[in-house]
Image (cartoon, rainbow, N blue to C red):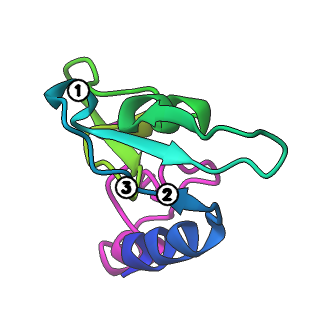
Amino acid sequence: FLFALITGLTICSFAEAKVTFISESDNDAGASYIADPNLKNPIKYTTGEKCTAKGYVLTKCPSGYFLTGRFPQDGNYYKECCSDEYAFTSEDCVRAGLRPSVTKCGGLHRCI
């Protein structure tokens, strides 16, 4: 639920004018054109460039970690890697008779 809520809020926070062009070339596949009112011509960005420009730079994590903070427009890019220990909501910890950690990763706690 928390992940869905955060994802929904994140999607709503992005506002940009997008112009889509039909190209005769396959070289533009996967590209978007963002209209900048200060420029005469639109700037071409690939989806990957948009992700990294907004801080979503991770595509994999080392063993024992999981990806969190998925980029809403491309599920291949994430904000951070969290240790597998951070897999619980505070309610999960309390139900197990433990305390949730003060620190969080990806909105989740360790149970201590």
Residue 86 falls left or right of residue 8: left
User: On the image, numbered disc 2 is attached to which residue?
Assistant: 19
At 40% from the left and 56% from the top, the residue drawn is: 20
For marks 2 and 3 on the same chain, the one whose residue lies earlier in the sequence: 2
Residue type (three-letter) at the residue carrying disc 3: Gln
Residue 108 within the segment the image draws in magenta? yes
Q: Is residue 51 above or below residue 9?
A: above
Between the C-alphas of marks 2 and 1, the distance is 41 Å
Q: Which mark is residue 73?
A: 3
At 65% from the left and 66% from the top, the residue drawn is: 15
Residue situated in front as seen by the camera: 26 or 53: 26
Q: Quadrant of residue 13?
A: bottom right
Q: Which mark is residue 72?
A: none
Q: Which mark is residue 64?
A: 1
Mark 1, other Cα within 10 Å: few <14 / some 14–19 / many ≥20: few
Between the C-alphas of marks 3 and 1, the distance is 26 Å
Q: Is there any visible trace of residue 63 in the rendered image?
A: yes
Q: Is residue 53 above or below residue 70?
A: above
Q: Which residues are magenta?
A: 83-112
